[in-house]
Image (cartoon, helix red, strand yellow):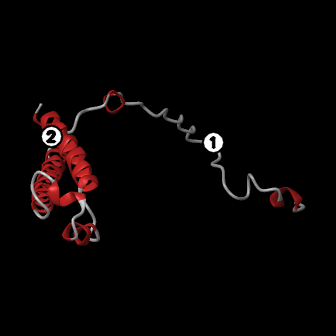
Amino acid sequence: MIEILILLVHVAVAAGVCLLVLLQHGKGADVGAAFGSGSSGSLFGATGSANFLSRTTAILAAMFFVTSLGLTWISGHKTQSVSVMDSHKVEQPVAPAAPVGAPQPGPETGSSKAKDIPK
């Protein structure tokens, strides 16, 4: 149950990080804001939006890291479930033993060279 909750938070944080990274301006956009670009009239000001988005991205990245470690720890400490295939034991057939007086197969009885030698 806790694993599902952490997984949902993990996916939501990952989507948030992707969204925030796409919303941020590149380093070249800061120069345009100094000369009266549209970003200076934003809600947070010219540098306020960059600081807010950068801090939020850093917080979400830290949360992503923590949830990744949590999911890894939970998956490593799970109890091993028993598979149906593991519980079914297949017995191997045992070959019948040869009688005591019967000749044992060897290199000279199964070999074609032993038949070629005259007696």
Q: Secondary structure at mark 2?
A: helix
Q: Where is residue 10 drawn, in percent x and y?
A: 18, 44
- Quarter holding residue 59: bottom left
Mark 2 residue crowding within 10 angstroms, few (<14) / some (14–19) / many (20+): some
| Residue at the disc numbered 1 | 102
Which image quarter: residue 15?
Answer: top left
Q: State the CA–CA distance, disc 1 to disc 2.
A: 73 Å
- Residue 23: mark: none
Q: Quadrant of the C terminus?
A: bottom right
Q: Kindly identify the amino acid type of the residue bearing the numbered disc 1.
A: Ala
- Return the mark for residue 9: 2
| N-terminal label among 1 and 2 | 2
Query: Where does residue 98 sit, x and y in percent of width and height?
Result: 57, 39
Give 87 or 52, whichever is nearer the viewer.
52
Q: Amino acid at mark 2?
A: Val
Q: Residue at x 11, y 54 (%)?
A: 56
